[in-house]
Image (tube, helix red, strand yellow):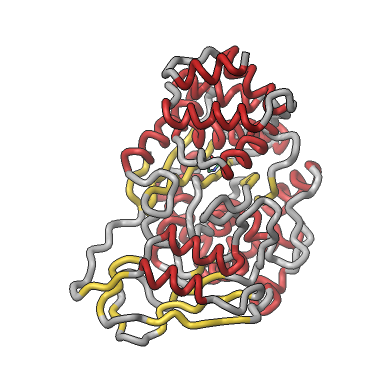
Amino acid sequence: MIYDIIMKKRRGGKLSADEIRFAVNGYTDGTIPDYQMSALLMAMCFVGLDAEETADLTMAMMQTGRTYDLHSELGHICIDKHSTGGVGDKTSLISAPICAACGVYVPKMSGRGLGHTGGTIDKVESIPGFRTDIPHEEFIAAIKGAGLSVISQSGDLVPADKKMYALRDTTATIDSMPLICSSIMSKKLAMGADGIVIDVKTGDGAFMKTTEEASALAYAMKDLADSMNRKCTCVLTDMDRPLGRCVGNSLEVAEAVSVLKGEKVPELYEVSITLAAHMLYLAECGDMDRCRELSEKAVSDGSALRHLEKMVELQHGDVNALHDISLLGTARNTERFTAMESGYISAVPAEQTGLAALSLGAGRKTKEDTIDKTAGIVFRHSVGDYVNRGDTIAELYSSVSADMSQAAARLASCVTFSSEKPHLPPVVIKEC
Ligand code: URA
């Protein structure tokens, strides 16, 4: 039977809801082996799935596990937030506390890094003691106490996605629109928040390389949410270059805290405020101008930072580490990456930067790898800045690797310079 389903999809056929459910349930309970599911996923990647098949896949995946009704459980409006994956993307650690400070609950079930992209769970776990595997009752208590909670995907939430995601990561089947759509939406819909804001990354370091592909993904996710009476906004944002100055887990936590303390890292601030404003808008806190104003105020009056601190405390983390970054850990080794020529920096491609950070220890090459939470890259200059030959563009950090030449060579091969100041397109591309 699974053989016939693989063959049907491979030949360009449309799968029925029953066939999709059979494949998803069989893979989840172990009766369909990895090699057959890989073949089916690869056929789906090549042939695609239409809107009905994508919806059927999402529902089949969602129904392999427990579903929640967080609105009823919390007795309060709650808005979820997700990113399709980027490099240097720490916006959840900024926009979620902002919403919490404005009275909107944010129950955030997050993932680990995938490929060259980072994951929120790996980032928050760099805070000493912080637990992301807390029982459901503690998750609810943290949301009620802090207004937000970040936890890892529990075993009973969409187990099909846990297995399929890991399989896709190792079989080059991540960057498929219907597969990303069903992976994200099965988890988001299973959580039962009132609304969902999704940051759809597009560009070099994103899974969706073009604005057209990212738009198609955004509308597919919105349609799915709509069909389940859930409010959903997608914000398309640029991922041609890393977001913000830091890439790497503890470095990104420190950068998020600095933004919540008022430091204006322009593009990171803009994306975080835009996402927070959309979250507040879905929670009916006012029109978009008012929601933006509320978001900015939550940063400037320090209330968002206090909510982040409270969440860290309630999830057993060391709050002092948010203020004394040496408590987040200091890398044993550091090296400078310098400008090879004078001129304006014209490109810092995000994917190669993510891979450079990975080679320093900031991500996993295999599922079993442990992460060096101190590893990563801090940019002292970014695209559009003028540098002289020999100036430090970035600092590389690693505790696991004393030899950073591979990461430095990767950056050297992709960072480019020009004599003219490059035009910088806006970081927020589309809101829909
Ligand atoms: N994020 C997800 O949750 N799933 C994907 O497939 C890609 C990004």
Which residue is nearer to you in this view: 137 or 50? Answer: 50
Q: Where in the figure is residue 306, as x and y percent of width and height? A: 64, 64
- Compared to residue 324, the image places residue 198 above or below, namely above
Give residue 127's quadrant in the image.
bottom right
Q: Where in the figure is residue 294, as x and y percent of width and height? A: 48, 55
Q: Where in the figure is residue 431, as x and y percent of width and height? A: 36, 43
As drawn, the residue found furthest toward the left would be 420
Give the residue drawn at x 46%, y 36%: 176
Q: Where in the figure is residue 105, as x and y percent of width and height? A: 63, 45
Which residue is nearer to you in this view: 140 or 201? Answer: 201
Residue 69 in view, yes or no: no
Quadrant assignment for ligand 1: top right
Residue 136 in view, yes or no: yes
- Compared to residue 252, the image places residue 103 above or below, namely above
Give the residue drawn at x 62%, y 46%: 106
How many numbered marks have been drawn onto this rendered protein structure? 0
Which residue is nearer to you in this view: 203 or 319? Answer: 203
Quarter of the figure with the N terminus:
top right
Quarter of the figure with the C terminus:
top left
